Image: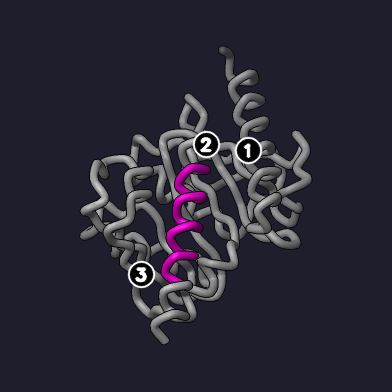
Amino acid sequence: MNHQDSFLSLAEQLIAAGKFIDSKGWVPATSGNFSARLPDGTIAITVSGKHKGRLQAEDIMRIDAEAQSLDGKKPSAETLLHTYLYKRFPEVQSVLHPHPLNAVLVSKLFTQAIVLADYELLKAFAGIATHESQLVVPIFANDQNIPRLAAEVESYLDSHSDCQAYIIAGHGLYTWGRSVQETLYYLEALDFLFACELQLHRINK
């Protein structure tokens, strides 16, 4: 597959992901951003300001590993949060950032992190083989200074290399995987697990 075909293939996957994520109500208005890594190390990413449930081919652009546009289009202000993950994790091929209600609500109830423990669905994540496990999802304060926020995430991951996702408080969720489809699985699993924790909070309140 040549470079252009690879780009078109990933663009189609991101467009399909956008439709699925929008069907769940996870990207209201123009929120969220999605990306996937191309074989040459450049990145296909959604352009800024587009509704993610109605993406067209022209709404997917290319950036380099330093988050610079390669085709004159404007990427999201949060692009550095994508490129940092690709640099840190060579196996990562996709990063998805929606604004699911459950993730936003979780960030209002927990301050530093939410611990998901003893759920069968934890086995949806790479490296987890038993329900007798836990997944810690850190929560970072929202910050309009994206380089500063990226540095905070980087500092956390320096000592938590097994992290699979994080939440920006009052904002949304970032997760990543070895393909667009795997990352979608993670989003579904996380949303279900967050919903479980929210229900437990209501019951135990």
Residue at x-position 53% and y-position 39%: 64
| Discs 2, 1 touching: Cβ within 8 Å | yes
Helix, strand or loop for disc 1: helix
Q: How many marks?
A: 3
On-image quarter of the C terminus = bottom left
Residue at x-position 48% and y-position 69%: 168
Q: Give the mark nearer the N terminus: 2 vs 1.
A: 1
Residue at x-position 55% and y-position 54%: 97
**How far is the residue under mark 2 from the one under mark 1?**
7 Å
Q: Amino acid at mark 2?
A: Val
| Horizontal and vertical percent position of residue 159 | 21, 60
Residue 149 covered by magenta stretch: no
Helix, strand or loop for disc 3: strand
**How far is the residue under mark 1 from the one under mark 3?**
28 Å
Q: Main secondary structure of the magenta part?
A: helix
Q: Amino acid at mark 3?
A: Ile
| Horizontal and vertical percent position of residue 203 | 44, 80
Front-lying residue, 168 or 131:
131
Residue 164 vertical placement versus 7 (above, below): below
Residue underneath mark 1? 14
Residue underneath mark 3? 114
Q: Which mark is residue 180?
A: 2
Looking at the rendering, the stretch of residues picked out in magenta corresponds to 184-198
